[in-house]
Image: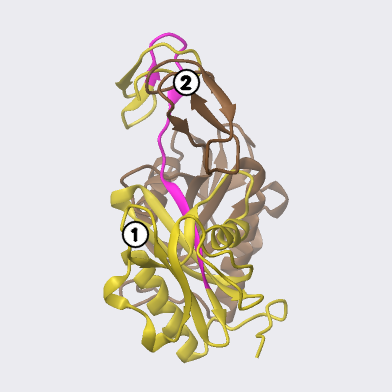
Chain colours: A yellow, B brown
Amino acid sequence: MNFCSHCGSPVTLKIPDGDHLPRFVCSNCGKIHYQNPLLVLGCVPEWEGKILLCRRAIEPRLGFWTVPAGFMENGETMQLAAARECYEEALATVEVGSLLAVANVTHAGQVHIMFRARLLLPKFAPGPESLEVGLYEEAQVPWDQLAFPSGEFTLRKFFADRAAGRGGRSRRFPSPR
Amino acid sequence: MNFCSHCGSPVTLKIPDGDHLPRFVCSNCGKIHYQNPLLVLGCVPEWEGKILLCRRAIEPRLGFWTVPAGFMENGETMQLAAARECYEEALATVEVGSLLAVANVTHAGQVHIMFRARLLLPKFAPGPESLEVGLYEEAQVPWDQLAFPSGEFTLRKFFADRAAGRGGRSRRFPSPR
């Protein structure tokens, strides 16, 4: 950050009065420009016991596998963001269920929040950010080809919870089976 | 947003190629300035069955009661942010425990994430953002004087979980009792 987004004057890095961290402060209008962590929202879409995974067509980690996930937008709920990302990356429509995982990704300035989800139809295809998309059994998950540690954490928790009977669907989230 | 924080030129609001929402885009260098939800982190600090609440000395909702919470900073984990906010608002030191609540606050462009916590000592005082700070029994909580719906949601879940024996402490988070 070099300039004030409000008035266009140069900013300087300094600790404002009453604060404890350096911030970009406008040399003209005095506006303080905070920089904060970003939210990444995603889900594990399930269909008849298989889960939907995407192979990334974009950096970082092009060619590696991920659950559908991406940056939450203003005006969205977490659940809507997770469903939107699933549609954008896998052209798949989901009903978002219970909270599955919340992970610090401190080095990237991110928090990742993942939900369980149910595919409404076994219909999917690669969106512009995916090379391929598919439904996989637990034994077919490419654990050594996953894009991000938060995705591995999410998938391991998903399968552990499912095996233990945790994370079951509410009445508003019935199993298709 | 009026000017590009990178080069200082005016920005215009338009939908970039391949995107689906209007963004502030620099008319000179082309940089896209995304605006995303903010994370608010907090906790419910417990000491011998009582919980720590703060009465706000700042707007919004000056004079109303809240759990210690505030904006997460880059470079922090969620747990560190929750503990830092508790120290800033109540000059109290906590050990942060298990995840308690995650709430959409869509109208404000925020997600609130709350943890259980244990006060390490029954020592606290109002920080600069608090008028008063105290330990309260469940029956003493000023439900009609709470600052935010996410705080009420958090406290109701805290007491419901405690009554049901849920959200118990791990071995790394022993009860002081």
Looking at numbered disc 1 in the image, what kind of residue is underneath it? Leu
SS assignment at label 1: loop
Residue A32 shown in magenta = yes
Q: Can you see residue B123?
A: no
How many marks on residues?
Answer: 2
* Image quadrant occupied by the C terminus of chain B: bottom left
Is residue A63 depicted above or below A98 in this figure? above
Bin the neighbour count of mark 1 within 10 Å (Cα to Cα): few under 14, some 14-19, many 20 and up: some
Q: Nearer the viewer, residue B65 or A18?
A: A18
Q: Is residue B120 above or below residue A95?
A: above
Percent position of residue B16, x then y: 53, 36
User: Mark 2, mark 1: which one is toward the viewer?
Assistant: 2
Question: Which residue occupies 60% across, 40% down?
Answer: B21
Determine which quarter of the picture holds residue A32.
top left
- Residue beneath label 2, please? A5
Residue A153 rendering spot, x and y as whole percentages = 36, 71
- Give the chain of mark 2: A
In the image, residue B9 lies at what x, y percent? 45, 15
In the rendered image, residue B124 lying in the magenta stretch gets the answer no
Local packing at callout 2 (Cα closer than 10 Å; few below 14, some 14-19, many 20+) is: many
Q: Nearer the viewer, residue A71 or B51?
A: A71
Discs 2 and 1 lie in a common subunit: no
Secondary structure of residue under mark 2: loop
Q: Which residue is mark 1?
A: B120
Q: Nearer the viewer, residue A170 or A62?
A: A62
Amino acid type, mark 2:
Ser
User: Which portion, as a residue range, is magenta?
Assistant: A25-44
